[in-house]
Image: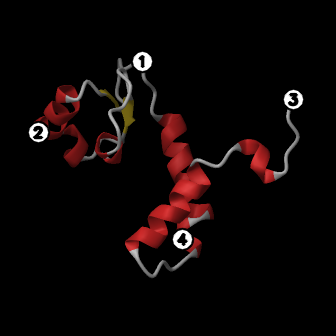
């Protein structure tokens, strides 16, 4: 939960995850609730569909992470943040 280590996130932050036991546990869900973070998991009846996030992380892993060997955790974090937070216009694409 890196977002809560940064300056206080805005109310209504949505935490997307899969249905892994670590994310579905009562302790984890209580930690999210304590910070007013809304969980988002793919499950029947949940209007916050997680499919776009699952697709994003699949693409991130297959196009970036699996092709590099990082010397340190910090190097990996810098690379991931640079790629996730890059402004679309920096890629050379045209703006509308």
Work out whether mark 2 precedes mark 1 in sequence or the reverse, and give the earlier one.
2
Image point (45%, 33%), residue name: 50
Work out whether mark 2 precedes mark 3 in sequence or the reverse, and give the earlier one.
2
Return the residue at label 4: 66
Return the residue at label 1: 47
The image quadrant where one finds the N terminus is: top left
Work out whether mark 4 precedes mark 3 in sequence or the reverse, and give the earlier one.
4
Q: Is residue 77 left or right of residue 87?
A: left
Relative image position of residue 73 (x, y in whole percent): 39, 71
Q: Which circle, 4 or 3, is nearer the viewer?
A: 3
The image quadrant where one finds the C terminus is: top right
Decide: marks 3, 1 in contact (CB < 8 A)?
Answer: no
Decide: marks 4, 3 in contact (CB < 8 A)?
Answer: no
Relative image position of residue 11 (x, y in whole percent): 35, 21
Report, in whole angstroms, how far the alpha carbon at label 4 lies from the one at label 1. 32 Å
Decide: marks 2, 3 in contact (CB < 8 A)?
Answer: no
Mark 2: secondary structure: helix
Report, in whole angstroms, how far the alpha carbon at label 2 lies from the one at label 1. 23 Å
Return the residue at label 2: 27
Judge the density around disc 4: few (<14), some (14-19), many (≥20) Cα neighbours within 10 Å: few
- Please indicate, yes or no, whether residue 61 appears anywhere in the rendered image: no
Report, in whole angstroms, how far the alpha carbon at label 3 lies from the one at label 1. 31 Å
Q: Front-most of 10 and 66?
A: 10
Relative image position of residue 13 (x, y in whole percent): 38, 27
Image point (46%, 27%), residue name: 49
Judge the density around disc 3: few (<14), some (14-19), many (≥20) Cα neighbours within 10 Å: few
Return the residue at label 3: 96
Work out whether mark 3 precedes mark 1 in sequence or the reverse, and give the earlier one.
1
């Amino acid at each position: 939960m890196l977002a809560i280590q940064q300056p206080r996130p805005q109310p209504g932050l949505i935490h997307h995850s899969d249905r892994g036991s670590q994310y579905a546990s009562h302790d984890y869900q209580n930690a999210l609730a304590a910070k007013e973070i809304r969980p988002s998991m793919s499950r029947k009846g949940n209007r916050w569909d997680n499919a776009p996030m699952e697709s994003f992380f699949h693409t991130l892993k297959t196009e970036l992470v699996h092709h590099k060997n990082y010397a340190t955790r910090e190097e990996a974090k810098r690379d991931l943040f640079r790629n996730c937070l890059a402004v679309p216009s920096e890629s050379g694409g045209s703006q509308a």
